[in-house]
Image: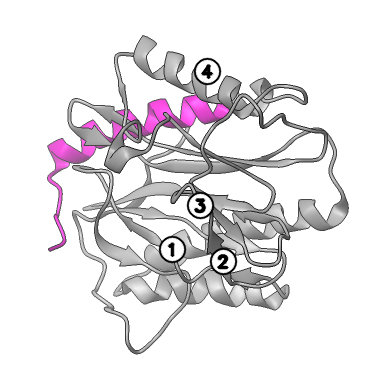
């Protein structure tokens, strides 16, 4: 069941999203070569609790950290570790949510550490463009959920990239994950509800440099590309209000 939010609920979700966007803004200058993914996770934890929030992902279905931090070939759900040291040119995806009084955000950004090669930079740029196009599609009058996936898929495939099919965006706001699912591709076999006022959606293209196929590591969390090539991941939480679509995860 899709949970439609009231204006009051959206205002509370907006607060959580703005705080998340501020954290992501800070991470863009914090993440440096030589630190560990554990260091990044601890920074996120301290920021959230110091602002009277709760890390939404910590212990969610057993996940052991505040943030999913996925490096290079890791697509999503990377577990922070003291052993994973960030290097020059790495692509570091930080995906997290904040619970503010029972109202949830969800956001991710792939950060380029220092200078990377042109191929990796383009992957990040195109993935971020795909997110913007997906959001634009969701804002159109009469739009349906699969219009988002159609926009993402068309743009990514135009550049020859693999679009992850096994994982997708979702509803959010009163829980970490809600209906509807938001795939980054289209299919006649998938549900395709109309986008309505009151929906709060986490739109999140996951785009691979090579194949769209993925593998799950033995930790039962981290998802990697099947061919070992890098992936990029960008996500925003948006709300459909009486005034139209609003991107909530803005700083």
Residue 15, picture quadrant: top left
Q: How many marks?
A: 4
- SS of the residue under disc 2: strand
Is residue 26 at least partly visible in the picture? Answer: no
Disc 1 versus disc 3: distance between alpha carbons? 18 Å
Mark 2 surroundings: few (<14), some (14-19) or many (≥20) residues within 10 A: many
Is residue 226 at least partly visible in the picture? Answer: yes
Picture coordinates of residue 192, whole percent (x, y): 28, 78
Which of pointers 1 and 2 lies earlier in the amino acid sequence?
A: 1
Disc 1 versus disc 2: distance between alpha carbons? 10 Å
- SS of the residue under disc 4: helix
* Residue 218: numbered disc: 3
- SS of the residue under disc 1: loop
Q: At 21% across and 64% down in the image, what residue appears?
A: 196
- SS of the residue under disc 3: loop
Q: Which residues are magenta?
A: 1-26
Disc 3 versus disc 2: distance between alpha carbons? 13 Å
Disc 4 versus disc 2: distance between alpha carbons? 29 Å
Which of pointers 4 and 2 lies earlier in the amino acid sequence?
A: 4
Q: At 62% across and 58% down in the image, what residue appears?
A: 127
Q: Nearer the viewer, residue 118 or 6?
A: 118
Q: At 40% across and 25% down in the image, what residue appears?
A: 19
Judged left or right of residue 60, residue 32 is: right
Q: At 43% across and 81% down in the image, what residue appears?
A: 186
Badges 3 and 4: C-beta atoms under 8 Å apart? no
Reading the image, the residue beneath label 2 is 214
Reading the image, the residue beneath label 1 is 167
Picture coordinates of residue 24, whole percent (x, y): 53, 30
Q: Quadrant of the N terminus?
A: bottom left
């Amino acid at each position: 069941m899709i949970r439609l939010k009231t204006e009051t609920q959206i205002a509370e979700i907006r607060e959580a999203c703005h705080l998340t966007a501020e954290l992501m803004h800070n991470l863009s200058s914090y993440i440096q070569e030589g630190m560990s993914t554990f260091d990044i996770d601890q920074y996120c934890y301290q920021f959230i609790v110091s602002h009277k929030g709760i890390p939404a992902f910590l212990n969610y279905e057993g996940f052991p950290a505040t943030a999913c931090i996925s490096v290079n070939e890791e697509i999503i759900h990377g577990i922070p570790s003291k052993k994973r040291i960030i290097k020059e040119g790495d692509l570091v995806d930080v995906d997290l949510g904040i619970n503010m009084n029972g109202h949830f955000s969800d956001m991710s950004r792939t950060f380029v550490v220092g200078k990377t090669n042109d191929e990796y930079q383009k992957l990040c740029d195109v993935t971020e463009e795909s997110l913007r196009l997906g959001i634009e599609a969701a804002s159109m009058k009469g739009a349906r959920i699969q219009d988002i996936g159609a926009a993402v898929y068309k743009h990514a495939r135009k550049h020859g990239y693999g679009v992850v099919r096994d994982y997708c965006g979702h509803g959010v706001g009163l829980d970490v994950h809600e209906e509807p699912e938001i795939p980054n591709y289209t299919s006649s076999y998938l549900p395709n509800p109309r986008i309505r006022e009151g929906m709060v959606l986490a739109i999140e293209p996951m785009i691979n440099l090579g194949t769209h196929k993925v593998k799950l590591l033995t930790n039962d969390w981290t998802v990697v590309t099947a061919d070992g090539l890098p992936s990029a991941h960008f996500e925003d939480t948006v709300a459909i209000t009486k005034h139209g679509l609003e991107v909530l995860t803005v700083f």
